[in-house]
Structure formats: C-alpha cells, structure tokens
Image (tube, coloured by chain):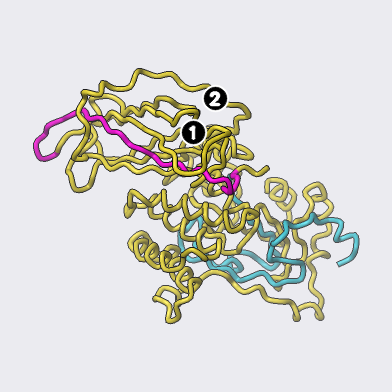
Chain colours: A cyan, B yellow
Amino acid sequence: MTTSDSDLQSTPPPGLGFWNGARFPDLVLPGVHTGEESRLFELGGDQVLVHLFASW
Amino acid sequence: MPVWHDATSELRSTGALSTVGVVIEQHPDRARLFMQWKRFDWPLLWDPFNLLELPAVPITMFLDGQRVIRMLQPKLDRASEITSRLSRLLSVGDAETTGHEEIPSPVPGPTHMSPPSTSTPLDWSDHAVALALWGGTERLDEAVTASERAVGPDAAGRLWFRHGVIARMRHDSPARRLDDFNVAVESWSRALDVDPNNYIWRRRLQQYGPTLTKPYAFFDWVPVARSDIEERGETPESLVVEPGGAEFADPARSETPSAQGPPPPDPRIALDEVPFVDVRGAVVPAAVRPGGLARIHLDMEPSPGKTAHWNNEAGPLHAWIDPPQGWKTDGAHVALDAPDSAVSGERRHVEFEIRSPDDAEPGTHEVEVVMLYAVCEDDTGVCLVRRREVRVHVEVDLGAVALADG
C-alpha cells in the first residue's frame, strides 16, 4: 500500500484484532433477516465492504 | 454507514462490490428495523456475544477477493476519492494471493453443541454460546448451565460478558427466569470491571443504565424510523422486545426534579404475603461510587405456581420509591397503565434512577419500594388489591467502574 493509500484511512481503535494484510475470518453466524446459519463470504461477492456495527 | 452506502451504490449495482454487515448487539430485530428504515438491502449477520472481540464499533473495512483486508477504517470524508480508486486499491496481484495471516473464525461451530471433552472455562463458554446461537429457545437452559461452568472469580471478562448475553437472551424468551436480567447485569458489570476499555461491553450496560451515563441516545431512532417507514406506505419490522425507558432515554445533562405523585398507600391495605406476584430487582451498574448514579429495574409477574392474574379493571400498578437518607431519585412515584383486557399475566417492568450522596458509605444500601397492585385468583375468582414492600440493595464501592465514558 502506498503512502497516499494510508492517508485514506483512520486509525483503528487500540486492541482491534484486524490489520491490513490479514485474511478476514470466514464467519458463520445467524442471519439477521433469515435467522438461519449464514456464511459471510457466501453473502458477499469478490470484493466486499464489511461493516461491523450496532444500531445504537 | 449511510455515507458508504451512497458512495458505493454504483459499484454495488454493477456487481463490482458487495456489502455485508455484522451487528454486535443483543437484539437482532432492532438492526432489522434499522436496515429497513435506511433502505440498506445488504445481508447482515448477528454476533451478540462480540465473538470478534471488538473493542468498539463501528469498524469498516474493504476486503479483496481473497478476503484480505486492504483498507481498514477508510476515512469518511474521503469516501468519494476512495470509491473512485477502489478497483486499484482492491486489486490482487499474482504475488499477493498467499502469505496473508488467516484470522481464525471465533464462532463456535456445530461441534460445540455437545458438551466439551475438556473442561477449560473457554470450552464451556464456547459450548454455551453454540447452544444459545444454534439451539433455539429450547436449549437456553442448557446454555445458561454450561456458561455457569465457565465463569468464576478469575474468569476472563469476555466469558462474563457472554454469560450476561445468554442470561439476557433467556430473559427475553418464553423460557425466562425472574433472575435472568439481574444475572445479566452482574455479569456485564464483572466483565467491565476486568476490562473497562471494551466499549461493546460498556454500551451493553449503559443501554440499561442511568440516563446521565449514556454518551448519546441509544434507541430514540426507533419511533422516528417507524414513522418514516409508515409514511412510505410500508409496515415496520416488528420488535420482539420493545426498548424500555432506559434505552429510549435521551442523554440529559442535568438532574431531573423528583416527580410528585399520589401519597403512598394506606399501610392498613393487606400485604401480599402469598405472594401472588414474583418481583425481582436489578441495579445497573451493579455497584456505584459515592455520588454515582444507578438505574433500578423491577420486573413483576404473577407467580407461576399461584394461579393468579393481574386484574386490569382495578387500574394501574403503582410503585413508590423511598431512597435512603440523602439519596435522590428521579421518580418518587410510577404508575403503569394496564392492558385493555380484563385480566392478563404479562411481565411488568418499572424503572427509575437514584443518585447516592457524595459522602455515601461503602457497603450495601437499601432502596425501599412500595407497590400496590390488583390480582385475581384463578381458583376462586376472588380479586384483591395488595400492597407489596420490596427492598432493592444498591452497593456503594469506592473502586466501582464508572459507567459513563468520560
């Protein structure tokens, strides 16, 4: 990643177990809309924008 | 998220990019309503246990086709620039497809549905989480029992947090026990005591805690969302558990004057000595410092073994709060309106806040609550008004973790 690319990112919170270059875990969790077992990367396509969030 | 949703709409429409979400909160139906409101149509997974061990949210990241994180926490104010360069930012060269450290999935899978062959606290906690995630309501009792084996005086904070989540899940289910919410609050308090820097754990407690400890309004968006959705001619997604008073509270920045109400009931009205109604209190947070705020929750429901119901024709349930000398409360009196039906058996809930004086002595303090309610006995058809005196214990601890962010 170039320096200019780094400028496009904010500092992640300390203790976050993710970093650029790590392979994101292939999560299997209940789907919010289906209630069924769902695999994250079967839901997404080749390139994925991931949001980890809460509605509060 | 709305910024990214808008900025990436064209990429999504052409199939160049997908969006997925993982929601880190107790009630997934609230996230469903939020998604409907914002017209976010991408898939969402539910991680109430914070198995990803996030210290805070929101976290946003772009992944390439190999699941490799290429951009963590992209700057919102550069969204347009980032999306215009995204194909280059996420492109994978031949030499880049290997050598990336795999972050293992933290989610206990189907193998954890059976009791663990080893007996470490984490094994039992993973088993409990698997039962809670994949076993449905009918296995929540097993989940609680398994999780109880995972927590002890030296348990890791995340195991206490998980234990609280499971207890609250059962509290919100038909399998609920009257003590479940209290267990949840105490467990989350212990988690935060172990690590006060985890803002997922802190928010779960703040969700039910005093107004002044909240950094912002948590669920005030719910009525706005419903109104907007109905204006669009749609039916809002229903919520399994309506947000309670603490969750709706806008963060006030000053003390609320004590509410005035009718005088407490005549002490000659007979006490419910049977009792026909089970009452359980929970204090959020579990302990406060001198001068600290706490929110008290009282859950009441007709005792399962006593075959009684609420008599709704006799008017509301009343509660009068009598804090210890020198303590303040925001609600000296609370009246709960009854449902329209003549009788009912639902759980009822009262919340109020108290503040300890700056010179409060460490130790256990009692808040007295007097209630007045009407019940009908199923066996005899006799309907009575009964008085109930409840003492809620509030711990003052000089080392209690402050619930507010600051």
Name the chain letter of the residue that bears numbered label 2. B
**Residue at coordinates 75% horizontally, 80% vertically from top-left?**
B99
**Pointer 2 or 1: first along the chain:** 2
- Is residue B400 on the magenta stretch? yes
Q: Nearer the viewer, residue A19 or B252?
A: B252
**Residue at coordinates 66% horizontally, 52% vertically from top-left?**
B58
Q: Is residue B228 visible?
A: no
Tell me the quarter of the image containing the C terminus of chain B: top right
Q: Nearer the viewer, residue B148 or B71?
A: B148
Residue B319 lies, with reference to residue B125, above or below; the image says above
List x then y, in percent, for residue B176: 34, 52
Q: Check chain identity for marks 2 and 1: say if they share one.
A: yes
**What secondary structure is marked by label 2?**
loop
Q: Is residue B273 left or right of residue A42?
A: left
**Residue at coordinates 61% horizontally, 27% vertically from top-left?**
B254
Q: Quadrant of residue B219?
A: top right
Q: Quadrant of residue B89?
A: bottom right
Q: Is residue B318 left or right of residue B344?
A: right
**Residue at coordinates 41% horizontally, 49% vertically from top-left?**
B181
Residue with the mark numbered 2? B256
Q: Say few, some or many: other residues with alpha carbon within 10 Å of mark 1 (under 14 / 14 to 19 / 20 or more).
A: many
Residue B293 lies, with reference to residue A46, above or below; the image says above
Residue B104 lies, with reference to residue B39, above or below; the image says below
Return the mark for residue B353: 1
- Among all residues in the image, which is located at the extreme right? A3
Specify the amino acid type for callout 1: Glu
- Is residue B224 on the magenta stretch? no
Number of disc labels: 2
Specify the amino acid type for callout 2: Thr
Magenta residues (range): B378-403
